[in-house]
């Protein structure tokens, strides 16, 4: 349900379909193994750097997590935004 609402948010912002697919892909990948309510900046950083991804892929994953957690925090879904200070 949260991913559907986040996807709708991106559509409402008129993001390109490829951008939406990319953002949702990384967020879904993260959420498939982690509870967003227990996310911390350190946990997010370790997760994006644990896959052996290229720097460009890490940057895309970080941007996706920042976008998602900012949306979740701003809409009251989550009480905190652990991605706010996530380093690239």
Image (cartoon, helix red, strand yellow):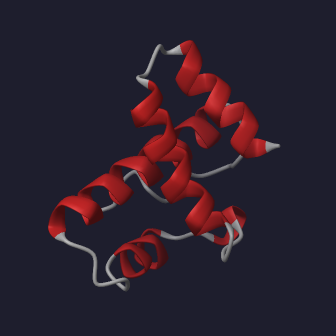
Towards the viewer: 64 or 54: 54
- Check the image and report above or below for 46 versus 86: below
For image coordinates 43% across by 68% down, the residue present is 41
- Check the image and report above or below for 2 versus 88: above
Q: Position of residue 23 (x, y in %)?
A: 47, 45
- Check the image and report above or below for 54 versus 65: below
Q: Position of residue 68 (x, y in %)?
A: 53, 44
- Check the image and report above or below for 58 versus 70: below
Q: Is 30 left or right of 14, judged from the image as shown?
A: right
For image coordinates 70% across by 44% down, the residue present is 3
For image coordinates 33% across by 61% down, the residue present is 86
Q: How many marks?
A: 0
Q: Is residue 15 visible?
A: yes
User: Of all residues shown, which one is farthest toward the left?
Assistant: 55
For image coordinates 27% across by 62% down, the residue present is 57
Q: Position of residue 64 (x, y in %)?
A: 42, 49
Q: Quadrant of the C terminus?
A: bottom left
Q: Quadrant of the N terminus?
A: top right
Q: Is residue 81 visible?
A: no
Q: Is 46 left or right of 60, judged from the image as shown?
A: right
User: Of all residues shown, which one is farthest toward the front?
Assistant: 18
């Amino acid at each position: 349900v949260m991913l559907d609402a986040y996807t709708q948010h991106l559509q409402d912002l008129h993001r390109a379909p490829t951008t939406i697919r990319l953002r949702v892909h990384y967020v879904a990948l993260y959420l498939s193994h982690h509870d967003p309510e227990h996310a911390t900046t350190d946990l997010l950083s370790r997760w994006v750097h644990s896959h052996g991804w290229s720097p460009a892929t890490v940057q895309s994953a970080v941007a996706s997590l920042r976008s998602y957690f900012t949306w979740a925090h701003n809409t009251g879904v989550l009480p905190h935004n652990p991605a706010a200070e996530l380093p690239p």
